[in-house]
Image (cartoon, rainbow, N blue to C red):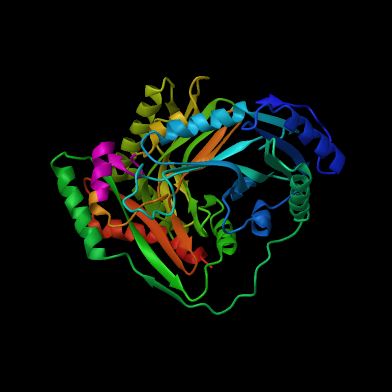
């Protein structure tokens, strides 16, 4: 990536923006050649969710991720350039696409700021191939947004990414960019705009055939009993319908209010369908070549009183079944990272991660990332972890497709971003829902190991549905 030092706000004067883009255009030598231009600007504090509401269109891509308790959020709106993929080499192809784009990018502005410069936003489905021809999302989607708006604590950053070719009409392009920039800048200190609530009828089907789910758990336990697998994660769904379309932005706002300790996320497919959720599970975070990841497995409810809460926590920490399930995940992550040449470090015993309605066994894992290891190589190596698939991984994946009678799509899959420096953050798309107009499909899963009880696993899934059931508006 080429960096051009310009300190002025290029969107404040038409002439400076025109001269800069004209210079970029004049560097093109061939008719087919294109250049990506990335402009970073410091801004007064913005709410990226309010910006998403203001300028995102249903038929355009977006990606939103927020960590409310850390005061950090980022919205990626529309695609300057994108790639959609199928097949087993999707992570490798996505990596090559990002590297190719960066090699042809000129960046300017305050590149020392948090979330400055070009970021590529990625979503990968759980399976590399779809069971149906009309799956809502491709096996891999990578895009560089036209607009990226972020906030961290008390400051915000706006990034505009522009594709220039020899045929571009600079006057028209600048007029469009300036108009959108003014809309974004006008969002400073503006709250979200919600339509007055109207009475809405919600209908939903409970877990599709509870007896079928419990029978699947019993069958999986038989496989575990003969050592065919040691763990499998089985998921189920709830189908919701409404007489009014679900409100995408309001639902996200509810999630961030109700679950500030989770990752609040949303991504779209350009066809008006949105995949949203409140995930407690981070797959990886890389900052300055330092990797953070988490083993998260083993669950218990929160108590209604301090005494009951402590009782559930003590039971979780002392449960042989839950500890065994957790250790499988922790060992898997350490082994996979080691196979890439990393030297992961972890605590000897798991901690508790306590969320608003559920608590988990949690082991943070850290490692330095060698310069020759790309973030997507780590994602490819870790996905899917035993926390969302099972062990052995390949057999568990085959068995999941045998037992589950729905398409997982982005459920339990990697969603995240990579920047021009190799910094990255990916989450696992659990506690999630696919929103499509007046219908919604909610996803949740439970880990099955020796000692699992079908009724308790069913109850755990019902508990995990609650965040979305409560938040959908």
- The x and y percentages for residue 85 are 44, 41
Residue visible at 74% across and 52% down in the picture: 180
Residue 108 left/right relative to 345: right
- The x and y percentages for residue 72 are 63, 45
Determine if residue 231 is in view: no
Residue furthest out toward the front: 31
Residue 120 to residue 176: above or below = above
Residue 472 to residue 281: above or below = below
Residue visible at 78% across and 30% down in the picture: 23
- The x and y percentages for residue 95 are 49, 31
Q: Nearer the viewer, residue 214 or 209?
A: 209
Whether residue 394 is in magenta: the answer is: yes
Residue visible at 42% across and 68% down in the picture: 240
Dividing the picture into quarters, in which one does residue 328 lie? top left
Residue 273 to residue 223: above or below = below
**Quadrant occupied by the C terminus:** bottom right
For the record, the magenta segment spans 386-401
Q: How many marks?
A: 0
């Amino acid at each position: 990536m080429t960096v051009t030092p310009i300190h002025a706000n290029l969107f404040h004067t038409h002439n400076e923006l025109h001269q800069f883009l004209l210079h970029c255009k004049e560097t093109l030598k061939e008719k087919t050649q294109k250049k990506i231009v990335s402009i970073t600007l410091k801004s007064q504090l913005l709410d990226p969710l309010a910006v998403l509401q203001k300028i995102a269109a249903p038929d355009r891509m977006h990606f939103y991720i927020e960590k409310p308790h850390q005061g950090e959020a980022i919205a990626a709106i529309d695609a300057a350039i994108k790639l959609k993929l199928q097949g087993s080499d999707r992570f490798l192809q996505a990596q090559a696409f990002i590297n190719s784009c960066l090699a042809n990018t000129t960046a300017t502005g305050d590149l020392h700021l948090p979330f400055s410069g070009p970021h590529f936003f990625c979503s990968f489905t759980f399976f590399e191939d779809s069971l149906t021809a009309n799956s809502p999302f491709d096996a891999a989607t990578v895009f560089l947004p036209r607009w990226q708006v972020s906030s961290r604590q008390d400051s915000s950053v706006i990034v505009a990414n522009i594709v220039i070719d020899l045929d571009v009409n600079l006057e028209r392009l600048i007029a469009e960019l300036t108009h959108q920039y003014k809309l974004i800048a006008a969002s400073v200190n503006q709250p979200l705009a919600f339509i007055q609530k109207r009475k809405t009828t919600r209908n939903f089907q409970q877990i599709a055939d509870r007896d079928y789910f419990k029978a699947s758990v019993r069958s999986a336990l038989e496989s575990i009993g003969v050592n065919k697998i040691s763990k499998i994660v089985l998921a189920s769904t709830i189908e919701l319908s409404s007489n009014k379309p679900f409100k995408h932005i309001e639902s996200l706002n509810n999630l961030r209010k109700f679950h500030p300790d989770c990752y609040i996320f949303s991504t779209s497919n350009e066809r008006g369908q949105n995949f949203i959720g409140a995930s407690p599970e981070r797959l990886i975070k890389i900052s300055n070549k330092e990797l953070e990841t988490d083993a998260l497995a083993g669950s218990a409810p929160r108590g209604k009183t301090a005494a009951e809460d402590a009782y559930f926590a003590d039971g979780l920490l002392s449960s042989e079944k839950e500890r065994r399930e957790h250790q499988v995940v922790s060992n898997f992550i350490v082994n996979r990272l080691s196979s890439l040449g990393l030297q992961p470090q972890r605590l000897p015993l798991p901690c508790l991660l306590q969320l608003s309605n559920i608590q988990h066994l949690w082991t943070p894992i850290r490692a330095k990332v060698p310069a020759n290891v790309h973030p997507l190589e780590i994602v490819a190596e870790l996905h899917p972890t035993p926390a969302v698939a099972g062990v052995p991984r390949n057999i568990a994946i085959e068995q999941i497709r045998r037992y589950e009678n729905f398409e997982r799509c982005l459920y339990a899959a990697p969603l995240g971003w990579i920047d021009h420096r190799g910094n990255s953050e990916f989450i696992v798309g659990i506690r999630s829902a696919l929103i499509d107009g007046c219908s919604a499909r909610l996803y949740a899963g439970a880990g099955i190991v020796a000692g699992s009880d079908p009724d308790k696993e069913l109850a755990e899934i019902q508990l995990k549905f609650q965040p979305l059931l409560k938040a959908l508006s």
